[in-house]
Image (cartoon, rainbow, N blue to C red):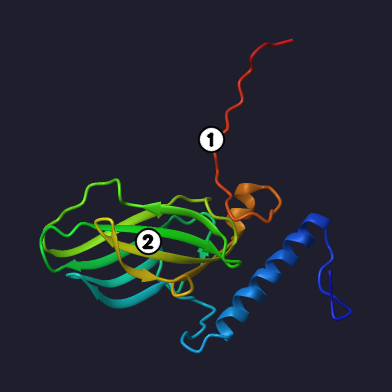
Amino acid sequence: MLEKGKLISFDFSYIVVQQYINYIKDKSFNDFYKESDSIVYNDSSFFKSLNLNAKSSGLIIDNIVIKCNDKSTNDPIYLHDKITFDFYYSKMQNHLKVNIIVMIVDSFYNTIFMATNMFGDNNQKKGQYKTSFTLPSYFLNEGLYSLYVIIFDGLVPVIHIPSGLLTFKILYSNEDINHINFPKYPCPLYPEFNWKEELICEY
């Protein structure tokens, strides 16, 4: 792979292609935040914690945190980490049903998947709450990701958090490379399915 006439990568073709795609993703992501006057870019931690104090219809969204295991928000996230998304909020009145929709978006603004708590139990009493969900290890591939969040009172959307305010980056560690024992491929999802080989008939 060449950049301005200089050789910057020499390897198997599929590895060079992956390196080039990651280079384009990083450049696209960095350019997006350099053009934004309202967000301070921080390459080490990204924006894995967001203090909102957003209020609507008796609901206060205090904080949203992206974390993994017992790490701090400043620590890198690797493929083998389980990633937890915590939503802290206060219900200021009874009979308030809080529903959350989260969309994971890649650095090209493609929606990778959506998660929601709309079909689960929901306490409708006043008080402070934390709602969480966790992505398993080896689910998202290496790359840059952002959250787009919509918070509902019942079925009525009351708070929107656009993509770009909450972001995180997933990296390969040496443990991941040894565990997967497989070349990197340019895809956002890299789940570790439970494959099982069975002998049907012996020849």
Amino acid type shown at disc 1 = Asn
At x 51%, y 54%, the residue is: 80
- Across and down, in percent, residue 88 comes to 26, 67
Q: Which residue is mark 2?
A: 85
Amino acid type, callout 2 = Phe
> Relative to the observer, which residue lies in front, 137 or 164?
164
The image shows residue 180 at horizontal and vertical percentages of: 62, 48
Above-or-below relation of 114 to 38 = above
As helix, strand or loop, the secondary structure at mark 1 comes to loop
Q: CA distance from mark 2 to mark 1?
A: 25 Å
Q: List x then y, in percent, for residue 12.
A: 83, 56
Which secondary structure, mark 2? Answer: strand
Q: Quadrant of the N terminus?
A: bottom right
Q: Residue furthest bottom?
A: 37
Q: Earlier in the sequence, mark 2 or mark 1?
A: 2
Name the residue: 36% across, 68% down. 65
Badge 1 is on which residue?
194
Q: Where on the picture, by quarter, is residue 11?
A: bottom right
Residue 102 lies in quadrant:
bottom left
Q: Which mark is residue 105?
A: none
From this viewpoint, which residue is outermost toward the front?
156
Dividing the picture into quadrants, the one containing residue 154 is bottom left
143 left or right, relative to 16:
left
Query: Are discs 2 and 1 less than 8 Å apart at CB?
Result: no
